[in-house]
Image (cartoon, rainbow, N blue to C red):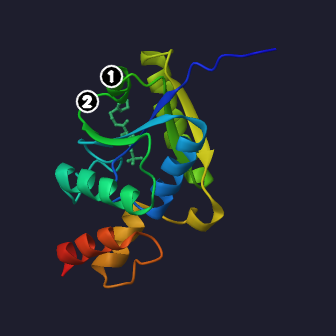
Amino acid sequence: MSHDCDIDHVVVPGTFDPITYGHIDVVRRARRFCPSVTVGVAASMDKNGSGPVFSLEARVDMAREALDAAGVRDGVDVRPFEGLLVDFCREVGASAVVKGLRATTDFEYELQQADLNCRMAPDIESIFVMSSPEYGYVSSSIVRELASLGGDVSLLVPPCVKRRLHDLYS
Ligand code: PNS
């Protein structure tokens, strides 16, 4: 029995403040099952209600550079967006959102977002990938905290991001 898959373009959204090895892993894995992946860098507030520390332009630049350096290039586009994620999905022609799930602490927030997105746009699917064990503890906020305290972030972010963090906090 043949089966046509109608999801050929997905959005991997996030604040990417900054992009980490965990995010790169999610984009790489999304690309394994989907020919076209748009990484959507959200302009707006982060989930704690405070604004990102890096400008939108810097977050987009870092994401492009980091994915390029990791060899995650073909079929992958990085774009900024403002407003609703579901509107951005429609704008780029994506029919699903892919996000990474780390611990159970991510679950409630992600379920709430997915529920809301589903109410607004039932045609857009939410797909979750479990974070790889080596990145389960990696988050942008941990990276920022570590960098601001002078800790080594080499295991968490690629060199291009490490440089920007150094510039920001030195
Ligand atoms: O990296 P994050 O903070 O987990 O990413 C959250 C993000 C940017 C994916 C989420 O806040 C989002 O989708 N923002 C766009 C606005 C929107 O559509 N919000 C959901 C319905 S109110």
Left or right of 12? Residue 30 is: right
Q: Quadrant of the C terminus?
A: bottom left
Q: Amino acid at mark 2?
A: Gly
**Residue at (54, 48) in percent of width and height:** 100
- Circle 1 packing at 10 Å, graded few (<14), some (14-19), many (20+), is some
Residue located 52% across and 50% down the image: 28
Q: Is residue 67 visible?
A: yes
Beta carbon of the mark 2 residue lies under 8 A of ligand 1: yes
Residue tagged 1: 87
Q: Is residue 147 left or right of residue 135?
A: left
Label 1 within 8 A of ligand 1 by Cβ: yes
- Residue type at mark 1? Asp
* Quadrant location, ligand no. 1: top left
**Which residue is the extreme one toward the right?**
1
- Residue 162 vertical placement versus 107 (above, below): below
Viewer-proximal residue among 93 and 52:
93
